[in-house]
Image (cartoon, grey):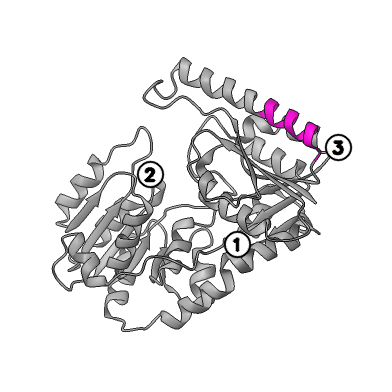
Amino acid sequence: MKIIVSEYSSGFSSYSYILCNELIKDKSISDLIYLTDTNNFYIPKLNKKIKSIMLFQSFASDKQHKKWSIRWMWNRGFVSLYNCIKRNRFIKKEKPDIVLIQATLSVFDCHFIKSIQKRTKVVLTVHDVIVPTNSMDWSMRSLKKMYQIADLLIVHSETNKKELYKRFRIKKEKIKVVPHGIESKYCKQDKKECRKKLNIMDDKPVFLFYGGIRKSKGLDILIKALKNVDCSLVIAGKPSYGESFEEYRRLILENHIRTIEYIEFTNDDFRDILFQASDYLILPYKEFCSQSGVFMQAIQYHLPVIATDVGSFKEFIEKYDLGFVAEPDNVKSLHKVICKAITTEKDYENNMVRAVAENSWEVIGKVYLDTLKM
């Protein structure tokens, strides 16, 4: 069996490269080709049996063209069309049995996907049932068209499956659930030492907000919910293009919240420190129609989670008993749950071990492959 994994942009490359490494272990796969863009720095981590090709052209950086300017839009449109055409030509030449699409821009690609289905089975991994950022790259209409055209849709939870059916009326038998894989290994460090590296010198609870910062993630709700809570809040992430951190900094001062801030992209080594210095990861999202990679990373580090009832958070937290769930966009509810977490003495270790064992990449890779063979 010959498979092409296509990732239009490197936004999901941390997921794709691990998936490729797991798929190639199966003897039924004779050839695995990974198509990505020029920004992908995970290429050296790929199994040598995988043929990686930086086929796709990258967009101009935001520093080159101001967002929503004529040059910015022209660049997005030209590059998107160029990449769709180049990918289709490559697929027609290689004649794979399956094309596994990890990331694409639906507003353009919904017009190109159908032409490759005469030769191959098209499988779309729906990481985001609805894309969490506003952009010219997608629309509800183009998403629906993509979902209808694909031969098979893979989502990461039963919640995502229900959302896909509810929003777009896609046939349920066409949607298969394959959980997001979890890496089981990481560099284990002492919690006190990790806190020292972050200049946290007391034993007060430490909460972590980690990942890209955008309005829908509810950092403003979290800051307000922590008022009068004796703790430290670690914020590590970069604001979305066009958004500023100043609004959050004002809220931090108004509510007298003790914060440790890293408003920038953080590498894997520093992530080890952040997660192991913390008592809870908090995901105060206002809206979300996806499964969170950050949530799965918390399980990897055996770090309990406080999350709002959006996306798949509640499904996984309740299934494995991994933490607490609050109402979305509700300061009082989140405050109450945080206080409950602080006063609850509970050992989550066995629950985390079970969650990792059942969702490790070794397990999920096999489930993924079995799903592709259906």
Main secondary structure of the magenta stretch = helix
Q: Horizontally, is 214 left or right of 21 in the view?
A: left
Q: Are marks 2 and 3 in contact (CB under 8 Å)?
A: no
The image shows residue 343, relative to residue 191, as above or below, that is below
Residue 89: say if magenta: yes
The image's mark for residue 118 is 3
Crowding at mark 1 (Cα within 10 Å: few <14, some 14-19, many 20+)? many
Residue that numbered label 1 is attached to: 159
Residue 52 point in image, percent of width and height: 62, 41
Residue 42: say if magenta: no
Q: Are marks 2 and 1 in contact (CB under 8 Å)?
A: no
Q: Quadrant of the C terminus?
A: bottom right
Q: What is the three-letter code of the residue carrying label 3?
A: Lys
Mark 1 and mark 3: span between their CA atoms? 32 Å
| Label 2: element kind | loop
Residue that numbered label 2 is attached to: 214
Identity of the residue drawn at 56% across and 32% down = 137
- State the residue in front, 16 or 280: 16
Q: Which residues are magenta?
A: 84-95
Q: What is the three-letter code of the residue carrying label 2?
A: Arg
Mark 2 and mark 1: span between their CA atoms? 23 Å
First in sequence: mark 2 vs mark 3: 3
Q: What is the three-letter code of the residue carrying label 1?
A: Thr
Identity of the residue drawn at 68% across and 41% down = 144
- State the residue in front, 206 or 360: 360
Residue 179 point in image, percent of width and height: 60, 63
Q: Are marks 1 and 3 in contact (CB under 8 Å)?
A: no
Crowding at mark 3 (Cα within 10 Å: few <14, some 14-19, many 20+)? few
| Label 3: element kind | loop
Q: Horizontally, is 342 left or right of 153 in the view?
A: left
First in sequence: mark 2 vs mark 1: 1
The image shows residue 188, relative to residue 175, as above or below, that is below
